[in-house]
Image (tube, rainbow, N blue to C red):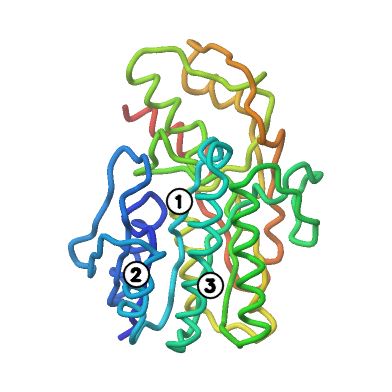
Amino acid sequence: MTKSLVTGGAGFIGSHIVDELIKKDHIVTCIDNEFANNDSFFWNKKAINIKGDILDDDLLKNVLKGIDNVFHCAAESKIVTSLEDPIETMRINSLGTCKLLQYSREYSINRFIYSSTSSGYGSNPCPNKESQLDDCLNPYSLSKIAGEKLCKMYFNLYGLKTIILRYFNVFGERSSSESRYSSVIAAFLKQKKNKIPLTIVGDGNQKRDFIHVSDVVSANIYAACNDVPNSAYGEVYNVGYGENISINEIASIISDNKIYIPAREGEVKENLADITKFKDTFNWSPKISFKSWITDLLSNS
């Protein structure tokens, strides 16, 4: 029976990965320190749950013994927080990833799946392709791209089978209104529920590629379980829907009651995933479009 470790496994994306792995009869160990400012945390009672920190060397050495696959989701993921405290963001995201990679190497982990971010593309023109140069506009994106470089290095130098998934804007069930990944959708829905204006940052013309959390989960499972050539390891893969939509259009679908506030530093105007590389390598495709999901949600609310 396959044994998997999920870091950040009580959070938005990580908890969905934990649930799916358990459905597939994996023995799952979940680590989460509950430091994120989430609305709530989601611990699956069928997992081996550990409230702990990925910077704890002794903890990592203990939990990695006998593990087959690592799904590394834990991170300081808020851009505003990273701007306020770049050192702590780098410590958690870059040093934490390095420690996990080193101990995964020492304990002969089979595959290491790294959750990264499309924010590493910065101001690159769309569609965003993995061949584009990095353009990190804030400490968060820089810390995550540093983790990517570490993953690539650990494969090239030590043969640790790493796969790097660059998520675009993830939405769906359990998304926190405070989460980096939920972007505006969870916040808009919460504001609508509370009957207050939707808060649009900037002019609202910025566009994002939104991908449902279930499609992100399937990407992780495909990356961990599909047979691939050795050349697939140490590589970066976009995980998005392949279409984008403006924040104004999203707001209009949800409510006519909206206000505009000043733009934030360090955020891009547009992103759009070219998902050809991941589709071709892993035979994967996203299934749920944002418009169909939000239409169904609002019609049933």
Query: In what element is the residue under mark 3?
Result: helix
Question: In the shown orientation, is residue 79 left or right of residue 277?
Answer: left
Mark 1, residue position: 213
Please identify the quarter of the rendering in which residue 48 is found: bottom left
Question: In the shown orientation, is residue 151 left or right of residue 100?
Answer: right
User: Looking at the figure, which quarter contains the N terminus?
Assistant: bottom left
Q: Is residue 203 above or below residue 12?
A: above
Residue type pointed to by label 2? Leu
Mark 2, residue position: 21
Using the numbered discs, state the Cα–Cα distance from disc 3 to disc 1 in whole angstroms.
15 Å
Mark 3, residue position: 223
Q: Is residue 301 above or below residue 72?
A: above
Q: Where is residue 242 drawn, in percent x and y?
A: 66, 49
Give whichever of discs 3 and 2 has the lower sequence position. Answer: 2
Using the numbered discs, state the Cα–Cα distance from disc 2 to disc 1 in whole angstroms.
14 Å
Specify the label residue 278 is tagged with. Answer: none
Give whichever of discs 2 and 1 has the lower sequence position. Answer: 2
Residue type pointed to by label 3? Ala
Q: Where is residue 187 drawn, in percent x and y?
A: 43, 28
Q: Is residue 89 above or below residue 157?
A: above
Query: In what element is the residue under mark 1?
Result: helix
Name the residue: 46% across, 70% down: 221
Residue pushed farthest front? Answer: 87
Residue type pointed to by label 1? Val
Give whichever of discs 3 and 1 has the lower sequence position. Answer: 1
Q: Are marks 2 and 1 in contact (CB under 8 Å)?
A: no
Name the residue: 36% across, 72% down: 5
Q: Choose between 83 and 177: the one closer to the eye.
A: 83
User: Looking at the figure, which quarter contains the C terminus?
Assistant: top left
Name the residue: 40% across, 33% down: 177
Q: Is residue 103 above or below residue 140?
A: below
